[in-house]
Image: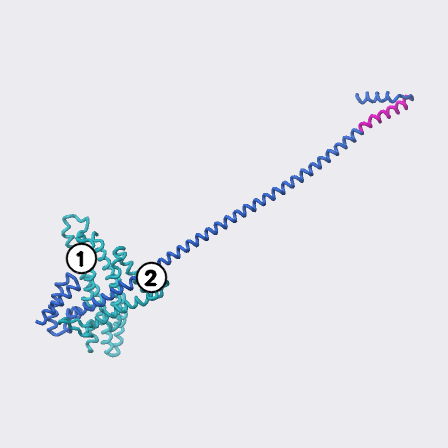
Amino acid sequence: MFVTPAFAQAQETEEMQSGNGAADGSAEMHTETGVADHGGGHEASFPPFDSATFPSQLLWLAITFGLFYMFMNKVVVPRIGGILEHRRDRIAQDLDEANRLKEEADAAIAAYEQDLATARNKAAEIGQEARDKAKAAAEAERAKVEAELSERMAEAEKSIADIKAKALGEVDAIATETATDLVKHLLGGTVTKAEVDAAVRDAAAK
Amino acid sequence: MATDKVDPIHQFHLNDLIHVDIGGLDLSFTNSSLFMVIVAVVTAGFLYLTTANRGLVPTRLQSISEMSYEFVASMLRDGAGSQGMRFFPFVFSLFMFILVANLIGMVPYFFTVPSHIIVTFAFSMLVIGTVIVYGFWKHGLHFLNLFVPSGVPGALMPLVVAIEVISFLSRPISLSVRLFANMLAGHITLKVFAGFVVSLGSMGALGIGGAILPLAMTVALTGLEFLVAFLQAYVFAVLTCMYLNDALHPGH
């Protein structure tokens, strides 16, 4: 009379907590336990198979694991998930920042290189200019010197020609004089200056 | 009491700490219940307190919490795909509860909660119940495709379906018995070898010399049991992920 409702209740709890499929087995076990309980208590059977302890274990497991699950679900899992998420975001953000800084540095390097190239070009230009100027100056100097030299040369040539002409001019006079002297000396007569001149001119023409 | 000390089964006895009897149903708060509470409080407290700072750079203890989170998350993602992540709190709670219960059970005089088959059976029924309920809720009758693998010749189909159904029905049993039997057998073995040390030690000088062997064995087994404690929690969680994968993708 006393046992039957307890069994019914136990069986209900079993079915509720452990779901379908277990109903048959647990019902059988309960029958055994009933016998064992009446026969001499817990000590007789192997503790893990002592079904008298099942309702208590199931109840306390349901309470503790249920609360544990709820705590995990509501507090711990979102919190650890949040920490990991936050860290991932932060790392991604830092990486982005690092990329941005790297791009900036690259741009700075490119600008620097460009400046350097411009400066180099300018330096080359200035150098070229200076070289050209120096060359031009040297060229001008050379031309000037050359002109002076050629002028002097022309002057010299002119003076040589003058001297030559002068000399050649004096040759006639010397010849006339010499011829007059010769004639006077050899023939003892005198010749007129005009005659001697004509004779010298003839001789020179021959 | 003296025989209790060497009786390897004694450690599994449930003792009422607070006797509760409702309508003839024994719902007492036992040593098992006490350790369930301890497991839940220790695990939840550890996870809660170590992550309280929400440090960007984790402390060592915070790393432990984060590593267990990521360990279970990658396990679930590998086993059941990214859709399986909706079950993450469930699988995480299961893994952490079983792991800590196993590890706490390694402390001498402490009770091992998963060494009772009703506890592991309740866990496995919770898993299979979730699989069945979610499977039918998500896929309706298509969930039954789980039992009909594609690409099987028509003649073999009844046989294959029968095998699939049997394998599905045996899952909760294998899942619960594996964890229960490992924890039970490990603790019995430990206790038996430790008992040898005590009984040989009481036999005088020669006995003390002879007790070295079982003592070494006990030390080695303790190490092994720590491995088993972790491994069984891991296996339970991995299989949970695989079964949840069936609920998410029943079409093989």
The magenta span reads: A167-187
The one of A165 and B163 positioned closer to us in this rendering: A165
**Residue A176 lies in the magenta stretch:** yes
Kind of residue at badge 2: Ile
Q: Secondary structure at mark 1?
A: helix
Please tell me whether the stretch drawn in magenta is mainly helix, strand or loop: helix
Q: Which chain is depicted cyan?
A: B
Residue B17 image point, x, y percent:
20, 75
Q: Quadrant of residue B131?
A: bottom left
- Pick the quarter of the image with the N terminus of chain A: bottom left
Kind of residue at badge 1: Phe
The one of B178 and B216 positioned closer to us in this rendering: B178
Q: Secondary structure at mark 2?
A: helix
Q: Which residue is mark 1?
A: B168
Q: For the point 12% across and 72% down, which residue is it?
A: A37
**Classed neighbour count for the residue bearing mark 1: other residues with Cα under 10 Å, few (<14), some (14–19), many (≥20):** some
**Pointer 1 chain:** B
Disc number for residue A83: 2
